[in-house]
Image (tube, grey):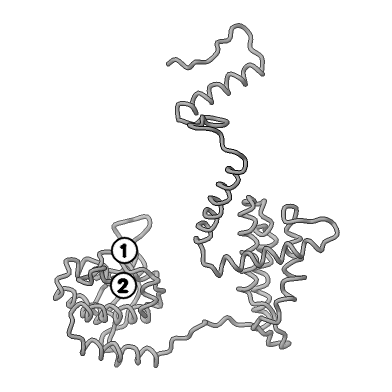
């Protein structure tokens, strides 16, 4: 293959060897369509003003779209924390900046500045003293905000002061500190049995009154999903891909929602379910069988083999072939 490289004869010094290696590397890049330096412009070179205007417009849109990866609340929190940290460093007479800050500066900011200023908005109370302090989740949030800020600045891995071992240890230690002081974590929303029975009674009434078969199947999906979440203690994102063939009825009802990561032919994670007739409310196994029967009457081709929890298609003539998203399932419930 002709490379277009300059030949060399006799003894070659270190500088000539590096030049040869650079020529080889550049040739490979040229073959792959990568040209070092500036490209060959098809027209005239832009003016500085035009270049700056174009970059300003493009990068504004670029950054705005990039921010949509996370929620507006998350972006707002990160920006606010970054501004507070920068202001904290700005009061330091030793000239410490975001770029030169260390894990020690992060720790001093959280304990000496952020926590005292935000204590008035906190709701976590130490039972031993009655003192209001920051919750473990709020401390985790401020560390996460600082870590993301440094990631955006190009600091990755050990170079990110908010990801240092000492900051990670502080997060875990603060959570243990709250626990030792008597603080107990509670669920934000408690779903009690009385509420479950009211919801199931409402769904049963709607199912009995519904004349449209598609809407009836949708209500049957809701009923089965509620019962599965209750009996299995699973979260919404863990049950979306459940199918009828992954349910075991009989004397020991159970669900097998996942597959083994190493042996693909074997089911994994046996989740025990309620036995039929064990109580006054219907069981998930019964609700699933009722749902499959409804899908068969609807003419669904994947009633037994397909996913149990699915959303209606855009035409509202049937159900999608793939499982419902955890967000959609959460909204329906």
Which residue is label 2 attached to?
A: 255
Depth order, front residue of 54/107 = 54
Vertical order, 138 against 124 (above or below): above
Q: What distance separates the C-alpha of mark 2 from that of mark 1?
A: 10 Å
Point out residue 154 in the picture as x, y percentages from the top left corner. Answer: 63, 50
| Residue ID at (33%, 82%) | 227
Say what secondary structure mark 2 lies in: strand
Depth order, front residue of 276/305 = 305
Point out residue 294 in the picture as x, y percentages from the top left corner. Answer: 18, 78
| Residue ID at (51%, 29%) | 40
Which residue is label 1 attached to?
A: 267
| Residue ID at (74%, 66%) | 109
**In-image side of 78 versus 72 (left or right):** right
Say what secondary structure mark 1 lies in: strand
Point out residue 53 in the picture as x, y percentages from the top left corner. Answer: 58, 48
Point out residue 290 in the picture as x, y percentages from the top left corner. Answer: 21, 80
Q: Earlier in the sequence, mark 2 or mark 1?
A: 2
Q: Quadrant of the N terminus?
A: top left
Image marks 2 and 1: residues in contact by CB distance under 8 Å: no
């Amino acid at each position: 293959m002709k490379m277009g490289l300059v030949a060399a004869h006799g003894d070659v010094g270190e500088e000539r060897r590096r030049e040869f290696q650079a020529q080889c590397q550049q040739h490979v890049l040229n073959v792959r369509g990568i040209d070092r330096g500036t490209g060959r412009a098809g027209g005239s070179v832009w003016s500085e003003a035009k270049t700056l205007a174009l970059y300003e417009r493009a990068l504004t849109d670029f950054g705005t779209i990039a921010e949509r990866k996370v929620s507006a609340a998350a972006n707002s929190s990160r920006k606010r924390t970054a501004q507070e940290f920068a202001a904290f460093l700005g009061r330091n007479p030793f000239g410490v900046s975001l770029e030169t800050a260390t894990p020690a500066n992060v720790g001093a900011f959280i304990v000496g500045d952020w926590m005292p200023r935000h204590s008035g908005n906190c709701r976590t109370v130490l039972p031993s003293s009655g003192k209001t302090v920051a919750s473990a989740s709020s401390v985790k949030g401020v560390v996460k905000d600082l870590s993301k800020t440094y990631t955006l600045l190009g600091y990755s891995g050990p170079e990110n002061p908010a990801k240092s071992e000492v900051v990670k240890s502080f997060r875990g230690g603060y959570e243990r500190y709250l626990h030792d002081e008597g603080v107990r974590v509670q669920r934000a929303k408690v779903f009690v049995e009385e509420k479950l029975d009211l919801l199931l009674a409402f769904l049963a009434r709607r199912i009995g009154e519904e004349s449209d078969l598609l809407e009836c199947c949708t209500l049957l999906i809701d009923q089965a999903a509620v019962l599965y979440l209750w009996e299995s203690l699973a979260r919404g994102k863990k049950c979306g891909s459940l199918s009828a063939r992954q349910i075991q009825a009989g004397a020991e009802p159970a669900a097998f929602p996942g597959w083994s990561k190493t042996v693909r032919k074997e089911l994994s994670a046996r989740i025990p379910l309620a036995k039929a007739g064990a109580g006054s409310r219907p069981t998930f196994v019964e609700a699933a069988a009722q749902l499959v029967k409804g899908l068969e009457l609807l003419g669904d081709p994947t009633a037994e083999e397909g996913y149990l929890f699915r959303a209606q298609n855009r035409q509202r003539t049937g159900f999608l072939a793939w499982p419902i998203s955890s967000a959609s399932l959460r909204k329906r419930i």
